Amino acid sequence: MSKSKQADSALSDHKPSRGYKRFAGILRFVGDYAGYPVARSKVVEIKQSITNLKNYPHIGTVRGEIVSGLRALPSAEKAVICFTVNDETHTVKIVCVTYAGQDWQKIAKARE
């Protein structure tokens, strides 16, 4: 089975929730070197960290020098979740999720 088909199969093994396919790049990247079971567990761990922001939106390190109000939260050993919190509307905006040395600071600046 090709690597692309393995990644697609790994994605379909889970009930796709909204936004799940956005993690396909991470799934394929990790799957290519560590296998798709490990990749799936990394994606699940990252998604759980994002879900936890609902109850604990002010976790992570404030990185206002990069983008005003930006927070960075490490996850799944090599991922960084960048987000902002709007206390008035009680919302969390995910700016980016990066993995394995991607320049999350540059990506966060470009998206804000």
Image: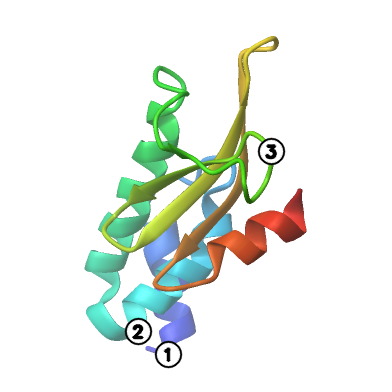
Disc 2 residue type (three-letter): Asp
User: Which residue lies under the disc numbered 1?
Assistant: 2
Q: Residues within 10 Å of mark 1 (few under 14, many from 20)?
A: few
Vertical arrangement, residue 31 with respect to residue 61, above or below? below
Residue in the image at 63% along x and 51% along y: 66
Measured in 3D between alpha carbons, the distance from the residue under mark 1 to the one under mark 3, in whole angstroms, is 42 Å
Residue 76 spot, x, y in % from top left: 29, 55
Q: Residues within 10 Å of mark 2 (few under 14, many from 20)?
A: some
Evaluate if marks 2 and 1 touch, with contact meaning CB atoms under 8 Å apart: no
Of tags 2 and 1, the one toward the viewer is 2
User: Which residue lies under the disc numbered 3?
Assistant: 68
Q: Earlier in the sequence, mark 1 or mark 3?
A: 1
Residue in the image at 50% along x and 72% along y: 102
Residue in the image at 39% along x and 72% along y: 100
Vertical arrangement, residue 1 with respect to residue 94, above or below? below
Q: Earlier in the sequence, mark 2 or mark 1?
A: 1
Is 28 on the left or on the right of 103, as rendered?
Answer: left
Which image quadrant for residue 39?
bottom left
Of tags 3 and 2, the one toward the viewer is 3
Q: Which mark is residue 32?
A: 2
Residue 112 spot, x, y in % from top left: 76, 48
Which is nearer the eye, 48 or 11?
A: 48
Q: How is the image coloured?
A: rainbow
| SS assignment at label 1 | loop
Residue in the image at 54% along x and 46% along y: 82
Measured in 3D between alpha carbons, the distance from the residue under mark 3 to the one under mark 2, in whole angstroms, is 36 Å
Residue 94 spot, x, y in % from top left: 60, 41
Vertical arrangement, residue 35 with respect to residue 86, above or below? below
Is 60 on the left or on the right of 23, as rendered?
Answer: left
| SS assignment at label 2 | helix
Residue 110 spot, x, y in % from top left: 75, 60
